[in-house]
Image: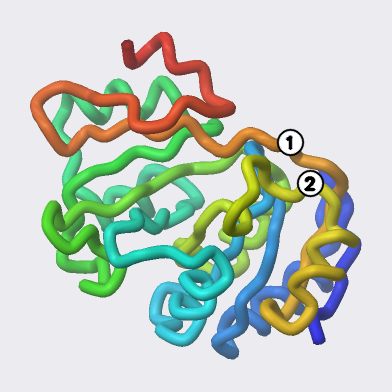
Amino acid sequence: MAIYLDVHPENPQPRTVARVVDLLRGDGLVAYPTDSCFALGCQLGNRDGLDRIREIRQLDSRHHFTLVCRDFAQLGQFVHINNAVFRSLKAATPGSYTFILPATKEVPRRLLHPRKKTVGVRIPDHPVAQALLAALGEPLVSSTLLLPGETEPMTQGWEIKERLDHAVDAVIDSGECGTLPTTVIDFSQDEPEIVRYGAGDPTRFE
């Protein structure tokens, strides 16, 4: 049964954040808020958590998982970025964007796109997500909390708790955080390609 945690949306309680981090370090899977919508997240080395995300969302091996990072220093450990791409990403973060980039050797193979060897990365602009990342000290492996057959992510923490009670270990609720997932831009080729239109303004990449 999932633990339900009510967290202040602007000033997350340190004790609650620490409790979530303990769960994550114990190979837990959590539903947490971001600046676009709720996401599922687990620790980088949590193989079981990754399998649970795949099962909840019914994802295939080609799905791009996202490493949700605290800042650019952390993001730069996991993807290769040239100067032009760096400038584009810097201007758009933190924010509701996911960037697909060639992965470094720091990224576990099971997270990579099987053919392209790429991974998604993002830096969220949400106090609760940032507090979790700061306390954890590493990225969260994440995927939008969009259930199979549905067109919009769930927005209510209580509804997530009700529907995923036996599938996740905790639901972190700080109020509604939107229904649009991130805008996804693929930077793995010569020209950026908008793969998904979402919460982030896409015009800067068109």
Give neighbour class at mark 2: few <14, some 14-19, many 20+ (Cα, 10 Å). some
Question: Residue 155: which disc?
Answer: 2
**18 on left or right of 174:** left
Q: Does 155 appear above or below 3?
A: above
Count all numbered tags in the image, as a single digit.
Answer: 2
The image position of residue 112, as x and y in percent, is 24, 63
User: 89 or 98: nearer the eye?
Assistant: 98
Residue 125: quarter of image: top right
Which amino acid is tagged 2?
Answer: Thr
The quadrant of the image that shows the N terminus is: bottom right
- The residue under label 1 is 178
User: Would you identify the image quadrant in which residue 89 lies?
Assistant: top left
Judge left or right: residue 114 versus residue 53: left
150 or 133, nearer to the observer: 150
Work out whether 73 lies above or below 20.
above
Q: Residue visible at 15% across and 57% down?
A: 117
Q: Badges 1 and 2: C-beta atoms under 8 Å apart?
A: yes
Tell me the CA gap for discs 1 and 2.
6 Å
- Residue 9 appears in view: yes
> x, y (%) of residue 6?
90, 62
